[in-house]
Image (cartoon, rainbow, N blue to C red):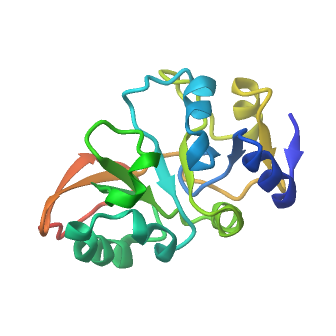
Amino acid sequence: MKVINYESALKILKSGSPVIFQTDTLPAIGCLPKFSEIIYEFKKRDRNKPLILMGSEQKQLIDYVHESAKDDFKKIASKYWPGALTMVIPCSKKEKPILTSMDFTLGLRIPNSFMAQSLMKETGPLLTSSANISGSTGSVTVEGVALDFPSVDILGPLPWEKNSGKASTIISWKKNRDWRIIRQGEVLVKGLN
């Protein structure tokens, strides 16, 4: 297990490799958006399963949101972020090259984690997934994650801040003021419609 600092993480990400870091829910494996294929390789993840774009603040993510959904995005984001809520929302036309979904949507989240936010303030948004091999239960400890991904560097310092160990809640935007819950997770969401 190689523990790295923010400066090293930035260099590794720019080179096209992923890093593992703590979030408020589960440890994440992340990469710069143009290198998304690397996450699928390391996780052995089905290419039909999209990744989540995490940012450090709303202004990092707003340009990824299609104009038709921006008002609803801002309303939900101000209420639940930073936190364990992922919004699946139509992607803006200019950001489509980073899409990992087939339906032109993108999952967006701002974790309530100092480590994750600090990293993404430096790197910009990262495409992420939970740090586990697809189909297996992920570890919530740095030691467990290191066993699954022995060649992926882990952002320190250690020990990591406490996380919930539960996945984020996922909601999907259908149309103006019309959201659907896709996965109930850490956050109980009310008043979506």
Give coordinates of residue 4: x percent, y percent: 86, 49
Which quadrant, please, contains the N terminus? top right
Depicted 41 relative to depicted 184: above or below: above
Foreground pick, 59 / 95: 95
Count of marks, rendered view: 0
Depicted 138 relative to depicted 79: above or below: above
Q: Which residue extends farthest front?
A: 94
Q: Please identify the quarter of the rendering in which residue 188 is found.
A: bottom left
Which quadrant, please, contains the C terminus? bottom left
Does residue 41 appear left or right of residue 184 in this picture? right
User: Which residue is drawn at the image coordinates 79% and 26% (left, top)?
Assistant: 150
Q: Please identify the quarter of the rendering in which residue 86 is found.
A: bottom left
Q: Please identify the quarter of the rendering in which residue 3 is found.
A: top right
User: Which residue is drawn at the image coordinates 62% and 45% (left, top)?
Assistant: 30
Does residue 148 appear left or right of residue 135 in this picture? right
Give coordinates of residue 38: x percent, y percent: 62, 32
User: Which residue is drawn at the image coordinates 23% and 72% (left, top)?
Assistant: 72
Give coordinates of residue 102: x percent, y percent: 30, 36
Foreground pick, 14 / 43: 14
Q: Is residue 176 visible?
A: yes
Foreground pick, 177 / 60: 60
Does residue 13 appear left or right of residue 49 in this picture? right
Q: Is residue 159 visible?
A: no
Depicted 147 relative to depicted 174: above or below: above
Give coordinates of residue 151: x percent, y percent: 80, 28
Depicted 178 relative to depicted 140: above or below: below
Foreground pick, 181 / 48: 48
User: Which residue is drawn at the image coordinates 17% and 70% (left, top)?
Assistant: 191
